[in-house]
Structure formats: structure tokens, C-alpha cells
Amino acid sequence: MAKFIPRLFTVSEPAEAAVDETDSALPLTSGVAVRTGRHAARANAVTATAEAVAEAEAESVATGGIDAIAAVEARLRASAPVVTGVVPADASVTTGSTPAQTTPRADVPAHPSAPIPVLGDGVGASIRNTVGDSDLEVFPVSLGTSVFGWTAESAASEAILNRYADFGGNFIDTADSYSGGRSEHIIGRWMSRRRNRDDMVVATKIGRHPDSPGLGPVNMVRAVEASLERLDTDHIDLLYFHDDDDSVRLEDALGTAQWLIETGKVRYLGVSNFTPERLIEARILAAAGYPRFEAIETHYSLLTRERYEGGLQLVAQGQGLGVMPYYALENGFLTGKYRSRADFADRLRSAKAAEHLGRRGLRVLKALDQVALEIGVSVTTIAIAWLQHRPGVAAPVVSASRPEQVDAIVQSAGVQLTRTQVLDLERASRN
């Protein structure tokens, strides 16, 4: 599970809200925010033996799995720190589980969700979460790049990367299949120009590129070599299996991954769209000496909760995986941009967002509006911040099509939601 540290962050100027794979949003109402850290508690680890692993996971899902989740969440909420003052601009950020010291000030509200002003770019460089049991330290929002080379051309993509990095962001998410590999090429060229490869944590996914599909050993090696060339680097920090490939034995895919790790081409492994059962199988294989997964990407948002909450959440927490939710803004719907049928353009992503326009979707937007008004940030920021408050979430993956949209994305790292605000959002999102 992700290890959380106290947070301190700023956005220096107001801008439009960020969009998840769309290109317009609501204006940001406040450009400055700080959050002191929350602390994620880890569920009991799965035992080392294969038999105990399978028995423990099966029992947790079959007998009271949902109650187990509620118990974990209750412990997390009970242990969450409360902010009662201001962190000075020159305050140091501590690592570990101790909240940063705060100094109350009379001219700033002592409300735990109130924005706290801190000036200066780059403060986000001190905000990091740990991915699983790895040594990867990442900004709590991963910059999704699926639009690079598609709706965002090279110049706009590099401007987006610049703005994200200037605010202290360091976690870039891509795939060999995004724009046929052009996304990786843009990222590689940008890192080469800025000479900041060592400052970035680069995650890419393999398995969907038409030249090397699936997780067969030969195609895996070819895919990684091609990604390394496009990224202009000698290693990938976090390599995801983009999908589960049931035509290949998992031990064969993990064995190939072990060779890639031993040769220094890959540092750590993650998975995308895996079932709880396959994660359990992977942990059994890890107990036998195969490399373990450290992260999982899954579709998760205020409007799509059932895919993660339940068996997948229990297994992910039990195995200590860093959770990276994608579609965090549901193709732009959770930015608040779409309120009626007239707001939808005749485009694919708008059509996907339109699926959420109904009683439940509008109820969630109303709750987001209220919390955003209370804190003084955008709807986009609150939607991402809710995910960051969920157990085990290390960094939601969020895209931007224009550089000014990055502000609302990164500002979520500086928002502390109260327990009441979290409950209001979750109540509105119930089916």
C-alpha cells in the first residue's frame, strides 16, 4: 500500500480546471492550497505460503468482505490528522507518519478544509507517496498522457509536461499503444531536452501495441526494447501489463519480466485491469521467487466505484499494492462541464461522458459543487482529491489537453477534505 507523508503544495495562479482526456473545463476559483498529510493504514499482509494466501483471500471475500472494507476505512478515518493552522512558506516537510507541525495564525480560518496560502512554484517536489513496497517516490497525481500525439500535439504536450514538472510533479503515465507509440516519443524527447530523466518516474504499459501484442516472452522483450528507444532511456521505472493475457501462463510472463529486471531494463512491475483472482495467483508465484507486482491501475471514480470497491480493494490492500485510478474524471463529466444534453459536442469522449448524465450524475455534481464552494477550488480538484482520500490510492492518473488545465490537477494534492465532506460525496454517488 502506498505510504503517505505530510503534504504541502501551492498553485501560483488561477487557471482552468483540468480535464480527463477532454479539452475544456470550469475555471479554478482559488489558485492556492495546502494539505497536511493523511496516513493510510495497511491491512494485514497475506501470508507467505501459497495455501494460506489462497485461503485468507477466499475467506475475506466470502465472509464479510464489505464489512472488512468498512472496518479498514473506519480505522483510517479515525487516524486521519486534523489541520488547525497554517504551514509557513519555509516550513519543512517531514517524512514518515508524523504530521507536519503547524503554526496557527489569526487571519486564517482554523477549518481543516480551508485553503492555506503558500507561495512559490516547485513546492510540490516535497510531496511524495511510495508505490507499494518499492522505492519509487511519486507525486500524488500521475500525469496521464494518452492524449499526447492525438488531441494534444507535440508543442502542447511538452507545455503540459513543463507545467506539471514546474509544480513538482514527477510521475508520468503512458503506454506503448498511446497514439501508436507517439506519446512515449514525445515524453522521451521532452526529458532529453530538459535533462531531467533522473527526476522523473516513468510508467508505461505493454501488451496492446499491434507490433508486439500480448504478454508472450518474445513480444514482451520487443515491446520493452521499443518503449526504451521511444522514451530515449535505458530503463522503465514501472512497467505495467496493460491487460491480463489468458493465452500466456502468468509464470511465463513473470519469468520474462524477471529477466527484464535483472538486465536493468525495468525496475518494478504493475498490472492494469487484473482480477482479484489473478492478483492472488501472482502473489503465490511471488512467494515462489517470481517478481511481485507493486501497483495496479483500475477504473475508479466517484461514478464508478463497484469495479474496485469489494474484492479487488481487499486484495490490493492485503498485498500492499499502490492503486492508480484511471478515468478519475470520467471523460470530463466530473469537471462539471456537462450539465445538460446541450453541453455535449458530437465527439467520442463527449459521448462517453454523456453516459453519466442522469439523476445520479447530476446528484454527484451538486455534491461536488458544494464542497468546491466550501473549500474554494474547482469541481475537478475535489473529484481527484476524493480519490486521494481513498485507502491505498497512491496517485490517480489524470490527463490534460492544455497546459493551463494542469493547475486544477496538481492542486488536488493540497486539499484536505473533512469527514463530513467525504461522506456527502459518497452518499451522493450511491446507486
Image (cartoon, rainbow, N blue to C red):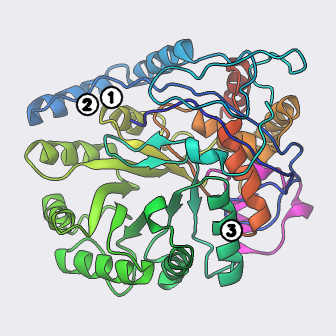
Q: Nearer the viewer, mark 2 or mark 3?
A: 3
Q: Residues within 10 Å of mark 2 (few under 14, many from 20)?
A: many
At label 1, the amino acid type is Val
- Identified at 89% across, 44% down, the residue is 29
| C-beta proximity under 8 Å, tags 2 and 1 | yes
**Earlier residue among tags 2 and 3:** 2
Q: Indicate the amino acid at tag 3.
A: Ile
Q: Is residue 184 above or below residue 244?
A: below
Please tell me in which quadrant of the rendered image residue 385 appears.
top right
Look at the image and say whether residue 149 sits in the magenta stretch: no
Q: Is residue 346 magenta?
A: yes
- Which amino acid lies under the numbered mark 2 shown in the image of this protein? Glu
Task: Name the mark on residue 160.
Answer: 3
Task: Tell me the quarter of the image containing the N terminus.
Answer: top left
Is the residue 276 above or below the residue 45 in the image?
A: below
| Region in magenta | 328-354
Disc 2 versus disc 3: distance between alpha carbons?
41 Å
Q: Nearer the viewer, mark 2 or mark 1?
A: 2
Q: Given this view, does label 3 or label 1 mark the residue nearer the observer? A: 3
Q: Residues within 10 Å of mark 1 (few under 14, many from 20)?
A: some
Q: Is residue 337 left or right of residue 51?
A: right
Camera-nearest residue between 389 and 362: 389
Which x, y percent locates residue 32? 80, 41
* Residue closest to the eye, 272 or 81: 81
Q: Is residue 213 visible?
A: no
For the question of whether residue 58 can be seen, the reply is yes
Q: Quadrant of the C terminus?
A: top right
Query: Mark 1 — residue?
Result: 61
At x 25%, y 30%, the residue is 57
Instruction: Measure the alpha-carbon separation of dots 2 and 1.
Output: 6 Å
**Residue identifier under label 2:** 57
Q: Quadrant of residue 239?
A: bottom left
